[in-house]
Amino acid sequence: MARTRIGVLASGRGSNLQSLIDASSEGRMDADVVIVISDVEKAQALVRARDAGIETRFVEPGRKRAHLSEEAEGVIIGTLDEYKVDLVCLAGFMRILSPQLVRRFKGRIMNIHPSLLPAFPGLKVQRKALEYGVKFSGCTVHFVDEGVDTGPIVIQAVVPVSEGDTEEVLAQRILKEEHRIYAEAVQLFGEGRLKIEGRVVHVLPERSGDAGSDKH
Ligand code: GRF
């Protein structure tokens, strides 16, 4: 089976990127991170990538706050093409992608989000979950569509909220599950087992003795 080539977009700490790097090197995922792109020059994610011998690219994001300039998006698309990326993984990427970029990689961009979507999309969601008083939260890997945290859901993991949890404690408990399910979702993608039908992602059963994979 051909290994999936992943391009990761990250803006910060990069612990989810690290989880993908580790899953790849430990053989838990038949996929490799081949390029890491960041809109933040000093992002820890870039350091982690370089430490793992992975190519990196800093892309000057432009002057908009939540979006990227057209030029920046052009560089990102060019870089993902140059590295022949099968799947784009957003891992703490703090910019909203344009509809053009999303359409260009339709069905081939995933994101990890620290809540059980559709509850608590957006930012600071662990705090929002605590303030709302939910007893369970969790995390979601979803395909990226043109909205914010609205795309078809691939995998979710449920995490209990305990009495007295702080935002940091809950975030940490959720993060542990994020690191587990992101690699699982990538593996399912690589095995050609994710079928998107409208909003719903069907996870197809494992094909025994399967030697090939359908790349989307
Ligand atoms: C994670 O909680 C992820 O779910 C969210 O942003 C955070 C990024 O953390 N999208 P890291 O940079 O992967 O450590």
Image: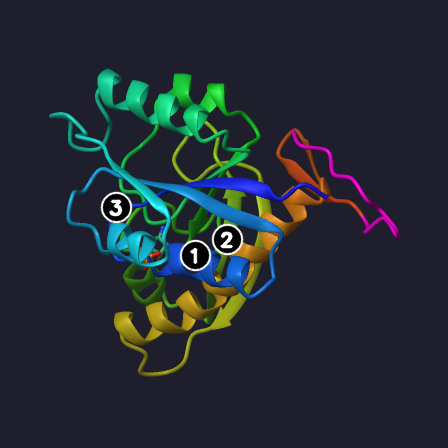
Q: Quadrant of the N terminus?
A: top right
Closer to the eye: label 2 or 3? 3
- Note whether 107 is above or below 134 in the view shown: above
- Note whether 185 is above or below 79 in the view shown: below
CA gap, disc 2 and disc 3:
19 Å
Q: Give residue 25's position: percent from left, percent from top.
A: 52, 61
**Residue 115, label in figure:** 1
Question: In the orientation shown, which residue stands out farthest toward the front?
Answer: 53
Amino acid type, callout 2:
Thr
Amino acid type, callout 1:
Ser
The residue carrying mark 2 is 140
The residue at the point 37 percent across, 57 percent down is: 52
Q: Look at the numbered disc 2 and give the secondary structure of its residue.
A: strand
Q: Are marks 1 and 3 in contact (CB under 8 Å)?
A: no
Q: Look at the numbered disc 3 and give the secondary structure of its residue.
A: loop
Amino acid type, callout 3:
Ser
User: Of callouts 1 and 3, which one flags the residue occurring earlier in the amino acid sequence?
Assistant: 3
User: Of callouts 2 and 3, which one flags the residue occurring earlier in the amino acid sequence?
Assistant: 3
State which region is magenta: 205-216
Q: Are marks 1 and 2 in contact (CB under 8 Å)?
A: yes
Q: Look at the numbered disc 1 and give the secondary structure of its residue.
A: loop
Tell me how the rendering is colored. Answer: rainbow
Q: Which of the two residues, 59 or 121, is positioned nearer the viewer here? A: 59
